[in-house]
Structure formats: C-alpha cells, structure tokens
Image (tube, grey):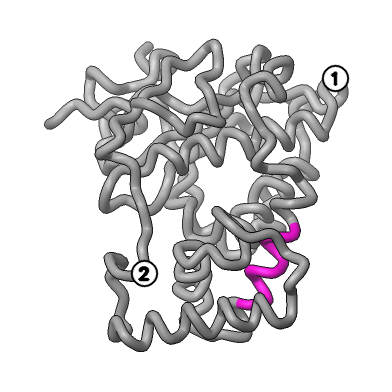
Amino acid sequence: MELRSIRNPLRHLPVLSNCSYQIKSSQIRTFSVRSCRLDVSESHKLQLVLEVKGKLEKDYRSLPVGKNGRDDEDMILWFLKDRKFSVEDAVERLNKAIKWRQEFRVSELSQDSVKGIAETGKAYVHDFLDVNGRPVLIVDASKHLPAVHDPAENEKLCVFLIEKALSALPEGCEEILGIFDLRGFGRENTDLDFITFLFDIFYYYYPKRLGQVLFVEAPFIFKPIWLLAKPLLKSYSSLVRFCSVETVRKEYFTEATVPAKFRD
C-alpha cells in the first residue's frame, strides 16, 4: 500500500509544535463548480450556484466576500449538495455558516492563537492519512480537563484543527476521520457541552466533512455519558464506532502510518 504523508498545510495555519504536518500541493482537495461530480447536469448545477449567490448578495449583502464568503462558489456548491440542491435551504445554512465564521474569527486562527491549549497534547492532526486517504484528527480524552482549561480555548483549538485537517484533503477525498482515545478517561474528563459544540459545528458549518468517529477502548464509566450524548449528536451518532486499539492498527493504518500512541 502506498505510504501517504501530509505535507504543506495552509499558509495561515502553520504546524503545531507537536505535529510534523505536511501535504503536497498536488494532494490538496479543491472544489470547483466545473469539476465536482454531482447527479445534476453541469448547466443546472451552475444555475443553482448562481441563484444562491444572487440571493445571498440581495438578502445578506453585509456578509463578507472572498474565500468562505457569500460569493465563494465552491462553498455554495458544497452546501447545495448537503441540502439536496434546495436553494432556500442552502441560502439559510450558508448565511448561518458565514456569520459563524465571521463571529468566531476562523480566518484569524493560527498556531500562535492556540499554542497554549495545543501544548496540552489533547488533540492534533496525525502526520499521515488513514488507509482510506482521509486526514486524521486525534483526541486524547484523558487530557481534556474542563475544570482546568478555558472552554473558549478548547473551541478555538477544535476549529483550528478541523480547518487544518480539511486543508489536507487529497484529491478525491471529501471527509476526515476522528479518533477519540478513551483510555484513562474519567469523570474529570466529562464535558457534554464540548461534545455538543464539536458535533454541532460539523452538522451546521462543516456538513458531510466527518466521515467516521472512532471511540477507542471506551471504559465502563463512558457508557452512561454516551447514552446522554448520543441524542445530542443528531445524525452524526450513526458515524460512531466503538473499537479497540488493535482495530485501529489493523483496519485504519499500515504499520508505517499508525499513530505512535496506538502502536503498543
């Protein structure tokens, strides 16, 4: 199997100190109105994109323009696909998503802005893609301490890493893999608010970007927490798989690409 590493992330999203993250420019996934394959004719697809673009300009003129703005045709197309090509639904979701990006200041996130919380090692983007060619976001749940860490900083790190993982999408891949290492998880790590935040931003602002979520070696104490969290995750609960470290090693990585924490 071909060994694929992650090279050259977005320029404004530099590498965290604990992750030698790389991606080849030829691997970066780009979406264009012309190249995206859909069950809609090219001409009709373009017509819908322009219709949404026009409505956003007319009804939400105060929204920013440019990349991830109201005139970003790639973003418009992605939300149209998610909303099954309903113009009204896409406009509504795009308005909400673009406003959120602006208010959250997503474009201003950088290594420096999340440096403190990132140094805890609680979450990072893995150096290599999984066997399905997906960028991998790993969370070490035992290092998540809601009573100690600022919730706002946790959220910034979360969004920064999602953006970083998405920037590493290779050609032909549209989703990322999330892995939660639950070894050592205890009551002090429980944080339903953060779990809700995480899955809400995927649902509303990064639709169809999360391909699967692995809960690795979940302890008994995690079971009641999952029963509480599951209804909050909406349709994303169906993406969750409880598995062992061995499953992660054998089914999602090669010997050369498996994360160090799952080698033993």
Residue 151 x %, y %: 82, 33
Q: Position of residue 103 (x, y in %)?
A: 79, 50
Which image quadrant for residue 182? Answer: top right
Amino acid at pointer 2? Val
Q: Is residue 188 above or below residue 44?
A: above
Q: Find the magenta span and give its range.
A: 91-99
Residue 255 % position (x, y): 23, 19
* Alpha carbon distance from label 2 to label 1: 45 Å
| Secondary element at tag 1 | loop
For the point 47% across and 16% down, the residue is 19
Most foreground residue, 227 or 38: 38
Estimate how packed mark 1 is, as few (under 14), some (14 to 19) or many (20 or more) residues with alpha carbons within 10 Å. few
Residue at the disc numbered 1? 148
Residue underneath mark 2 = 33
Q: Is residue 80 above or below residue 62?
A: below
Residue located 26% across and 53% down the image: 172
* Lateral position of residue 21 relative to residue 250, left or right: right
Residue 214's tag is: none
Relative placement, left or right, of 233 versus 35 is right
Q: Residue at x 84, y 27 (%)?
A: 150
Mark 2 lies on a secondary structure that is loop
Seen as rendered, the residue at the extreme left is 1
Label 2 crowd (10 A; few <14 / some 14-19 / many >=20): some
**What residue is drawn where x is 58% and y is 56%?**
66
Q: Quadrant of the C terminus?
A: top left
Residue 110 occupies quadrant? top right
In reply to whether residue 43 is colored magenta, the answer given is no
